[in-house]
């Protein structure tokens, strides 16, 4: 640390200098670009169909614009600082409570989806902040044990429990995010309606690209499959290691968007991605051990939801709730869906009498 006049620096002073912009409405004062300046930069360099930032953004509750951040930069910050995002560190991607600390969690999956999505969005002139915000928050609606929680919680939610919808409409609702960010999160799954923005469509593709590649890598590390098991329709097009696969899928997306103006992936990479996903389902997600693990997790999660529905006083905010009532039902789903795998397992042992040996875990 050093001091210069009234300044304190961590090391020797490093000069930055003032940025140089050709601006319309925005201002650069003393080397500091305000939010409107960043909006002007977006307007100059984004693709014609990209989503523009505007003021405080289209939010359910009106806010004052931030002085320096665009509305989507603000959304990204809010998601990254949220408890819902941090709790993804304790929720599994494929393997529940694995001994190998290098296997993915929902948090590392979300980070990798963001990396893939931004790598696609930036070179084709889409809004990087919106893309990053939606990708970062896309799985915040997942309960413990991943997709197993959706079937378990569906009987307690009118219309069923879908992690994308629940994440946008319930989990992240307190953050007052922009409508475009919420739409991209709500509709990132391919079994949902199309997102309204091209950035949301990129996130949908990035999610599939990321999980197909990294779930395979994790399964190889866990000894479930071997790289040589990949069918030729995959390995001959995108290779057998994650680095090569991601590079080829991302390149195919970028070149396809650039050449056609449509968020899509050309063949043969698209066919390779479909074949890759089908391989993962057969050999990883639907193998007997995985199915048994998912069944146990679903029973555990449904049991916890039923317990809290009939015993709402056992929840932190449930003292004034009527057992079996609609508010108790909604709060039970919210509480259980927010649990990490470890917390849910401990609650099942303590409240439901589960034996540790019966808990879902990766063999």
Image (cartoon, rainbow, N blue to C red):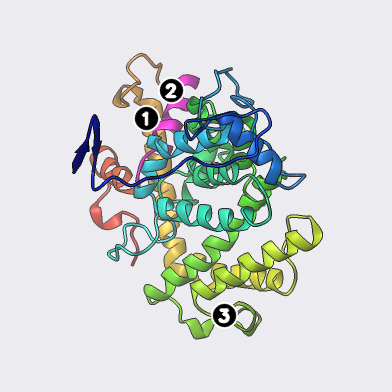
Q: Nearer the viewer, residue 16 or 178?
A: 16
Marks 1 and 2 sit apart, C-alpha to C-alpha, by 8 Å
Query: For mark 2, what is the residue?
Result: 328
Provide the secondary structure element on which disc 1 rests.
helix
- Asked if residue 142 is among those painted magenta in the image, a careful observer would answer no
- Could you tell me if residue 170 is visible in this image? yes
Provide the secondary structure element on which disc 2 rests.
helix
Residue range corresponding to the magenta coloring = 325-340
- Rendered view: 173 above or below 349: above
Work out whether mark 1 precedes mark 3 in sequence or the reverse, and give the earlier one: 3
Q: Dot 2 surroundings within 10 Å: few (below 14), some, or many (20 or more)? A: many
Marks 1 and 3 sit apart, C-alpha to C-alpha, by 48 Å
Query: For mark 1, what is the residue?
Result: 308
- Rendered view: 179 above or below 348: above
Work out whether mark 3 precedes mark 2 in sequence or the reverse, and give the earlier one: 3
- Rendered view: 252 above or below 151: below
Q: Residue furthest top?
A: 320
Q: Nearer the viewer, residue 77 or 135?
A: 77
Q: Position of residue 35 (x, y in %)?
A: 56, 30
* Most common secondary structure along the magenta stretch: helix
Q: Dot 3 surroundings within 10 Å: few (below 14), some, or many (20 or more)? A: some
Q: Position of residue 248 (x, y in %)?
A: 61, 72
Specify the label residue 17 is tagged with: none
Q: Dot 1 surroundings within 10 Å: few (below 14), some, or many (20 or more)? A: many
Q: In what quadrant of the picture does the N terminus appear? A: top left
Q: In what quadrant of the picture does the C terminus appear? A: bottom left
- Find out whether the residues at labels 1 and 2 contact each other: C-beta distance under 8 Å: yes
């Amino acid at each position: 640390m050093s001091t210069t006049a009234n300044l304190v620096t961590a090391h020797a002073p490093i000069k930055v200098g003032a940025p140089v912009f050709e601006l319309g409405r925005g201002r650069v004062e003393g080397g500091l670009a305000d939010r409107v300046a960043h909006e002007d930069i977006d307007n100059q360099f984004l693709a014609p169909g990209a989503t523009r930032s505007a003021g405080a953004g289209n939010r359910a509750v009106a806010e004052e614009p931030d002085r320096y951040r665009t509305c989507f930069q603000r959304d990204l910050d809010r998601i990254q600082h949220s408890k819902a995002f941090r709790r993804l560190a304790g929720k599994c991607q494929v393997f529940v409570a694995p001994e190998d600390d290098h296997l993915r969690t929902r948090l590392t999956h979300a980070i990798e989806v963001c990396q893939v999505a931004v790598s696609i969005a930036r070179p084709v002139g889409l809004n990087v902040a919106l893309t990053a915000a939606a990708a970062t928050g896309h799985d915040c609606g997942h309960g413990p044990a991943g997709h197993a929680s959706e079937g378990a919680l569906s009987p307690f939610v009118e219309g069923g429990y879908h992690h994308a919808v629940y994440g946008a409409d319930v989990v992240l609702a307190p953050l007052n995010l922009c409508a475009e960010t919420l739409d991209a999160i709500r509709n990132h799954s391919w079994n949902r309606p199309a997102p309204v923005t091209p950035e949301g469509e990129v996130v949908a593709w990035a999610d599939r690209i990321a999980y197909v590649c990294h779930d395979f890598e994790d399964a190889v590390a866990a000894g479930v499959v071997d790289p040589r098991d990949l069918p030729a329709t995959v390995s001959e097009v995108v290779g057998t290691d994650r680095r090569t696969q991601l590079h080829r899928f991302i390149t195919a997306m970028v070149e396809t968007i650039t050449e056609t103006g449509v968020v899509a992936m050309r063949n043969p990479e698209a066919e390779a991605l479909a074949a890759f996903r089908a391989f993962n389902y057969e050999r990883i997600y639907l193998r007997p051990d995985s199915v048994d693990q998912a069944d146990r997790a679903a029973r555990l999660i449904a049991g916890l939801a039923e317990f809290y529905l009939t015993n709402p006083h056992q929840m932190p905010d449930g003292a004034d709730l009527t057992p079996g009532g609609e508010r108790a039902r909604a709060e039970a789903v919210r509480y259980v869906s927010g649990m990490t795998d470890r917390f849910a397992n401990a609650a099942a042992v303590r409240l439901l009498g589960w034996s540790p040996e019966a808990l879902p875990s990766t063999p």
